[in-house]
Image (spheres, coloured by chain):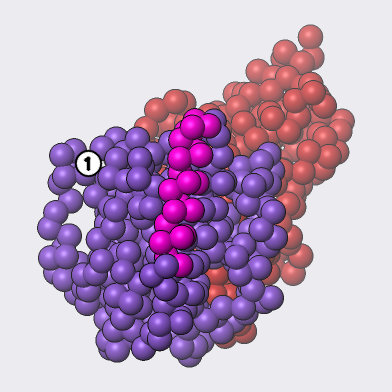
Chain colours: A purple, B red
Amino acid sequence: MLDPKQQAQIEDLAWKIRYHVIEMTGVGKAGHIGGSCSAADMVAALYGWKLRHDPKMPRWTGRDRFVMSKGHAALAQYAALAEYGYFPLAELKQVKKLNGMLQGHPDLTRTPGIEANTGSLGQGLSIGVGMALGLRLDRLDSKVYVMLGDGELAEGQVWEAAMAATNFKLDNLVGLLDHNRIQATGEIAKRFTIAPIAEKWQAFGWQVLNIDGHDVPAICAALEQADQVSGRPTMIIAHTVKGKGIPFAENTAAYHNGILTEELFREAIASLEQNRRDQACNG
Amino acid sequence: MQWLNQRKAYGESLVKLGQKDSRIVVLEADLGKSTMSCFFQDAFPERYFEMGIAEANMIATAAGLSLTGKIPFAASFAVFATGRAYDQIRTSVCIPGLNVKICGSSAGLSDFGDGSTHQSIDDLALMRVLPNMTVLSPVDVVETEKMVEAMAAHNGPVYLRLCRNDLPVLTDPGASWQIGQITEVKPDGDIALLATGVMVSLGLEAAEELARDGIRLKVVNISTIKPLDANRLVDVLKGCRAFVTAEEHSVIGGLGGAVSEALSGRLSLPSALIGIADQFGTSAYDWQELLNHYGLTSEAIVAAVKNLDRESAR
């Protein structure tokens, strides 16, 4: 179980992730603010608490794997990796630089700590299935965590992977669905129906957990519960707010891959700093 | 001459590999009885994964397996292995250069009865354009066996193109083989045939026919379509005044394209490209009928060479 100190550490990491996401986006450049900020608390809970990982040995055999299938949220993952020292924090400002270490979408050949190349949506869960099969063959008890977007669920391959995971009884595979309800062009429900989501995963044989994806103790409890299941994979459906923590970017498609003006950049930083002060008072 | 089946050689080679190396795993999409991966299933059931009829998921799963240190071989018909899973091969496998082996079985027109949906006229083009990919097209069972072994030893994505039907054995089992090798099957000649797959043996027939008219055809087996060694190619063409390429594939983007690209700016010779004109396949009662229909014959090679012979003699 999570103690208050651990919770505070995860929340602190989540705050830093959001801050870095805004810094990385900067002024006048596009960045996937919305989906990175909706995922931030889960990414923080994974790196800050759940994953067995060692920044000094990014390829350590015994590590747990985290695949960001919604690869456009790479900014959140880069922030967490930098905070853990996989590479210097200064690298974050060079995201998308020509031939740089931090690409627009995750690239395992360039970035320490990245486990798979994603970005063309729908492929991460399949990669996770392969990792889970390989780890099981080697009798390793490492787990594989895959974060998916809700818009991504329209990709047919996700459901091929969903069937495969059940077929192979992969209880070492855990999905986290960042259910922020908004895709690039607008509200998913108004554009292309993917509901009912939980029932679909249940019908495919997965253990399904519904949580508030910004409630750190709830995220951690779900990750623990996923460890208890035997013989089938778990999908954690995390209800989130797109752009969470950046008031003008919340619940809008405008900052799915948005450009910040100087004014909006300052506004985002100011509101994050206000959150920080509030966090300090509450803590 | 012995006629043997590449698919059988593939399945048997996988079993041999599996005995030597526990990292070898095999994935199938309900075609294991045809690709002959089923031999591996019988020998190593725990390392064999039936992925259902879902090629996209199969390839990305293979990517995941390779990331845990396994050496996955994923097979299907060439059309599905390359076309159905193209983006998975591109994004999950080739961008990071993962150690995934893809076998495209029943390639070209060799699945004669099933028609255009099942005949791969485009697999070489699709695989060849991908950075980091190695593309192999064996001439017979001996090369197939050596290639499967070389694929496992090579760290990176490899595509292997196999014929459904029996092919004459041209390769000496004792000879060594390595990726990138270009083999002069009949070394002497004034005009060269650069061929792959079944077109090599048809080229040897053509060479005999041409010899009667006093035309000496050099026959070259290009079984590594990528990487294509341009220096070696220039070397092989030394002393030749023209060349013909021949492949059981679209004339666009396959061996002919690869050779033309490799020679561009280096060596300018009169040439002709034999392949399937820009069109899809069709059903037929047998393979020979189809090869005739699309002009993939020794007669077509003879005609192309005679044409070049006249032109280049002027």
The residue under the point 46% across, 67% down is A280
Crowd rating for badge 1 (residues with CA inside 10 Å; few <14, some 14–19, many 20+) = some
Residue B149 appears in view: no
How far across and how far down the image is residue B245, in percent? 64, 33
Looking at the rendering, the stretch of residues picked out in magenta corresponds to A259-280
Find out whether residue A150 is within the magenta segment: no
Q: Main secondary structure of the magenta part?
A: helix
Q: Residue at x 64, y 47 (%)?
A: A93
- Position of B14 with respect to B155 (left or right) is left
Q: Which residue is mark 1?
A: A187
Visible residue check, residue B268: yes
Relative to B148, is A254 above or below?
above
Residue at 16%, 71% in the rendered image = A202
Q: Position of residue B78 (x, y in %)?
A: 43, 51
**Quarter of the image with the N terminus of chain B in it:** bottom right
- Left/right placement of residue A281 relative to residue A205 reads right
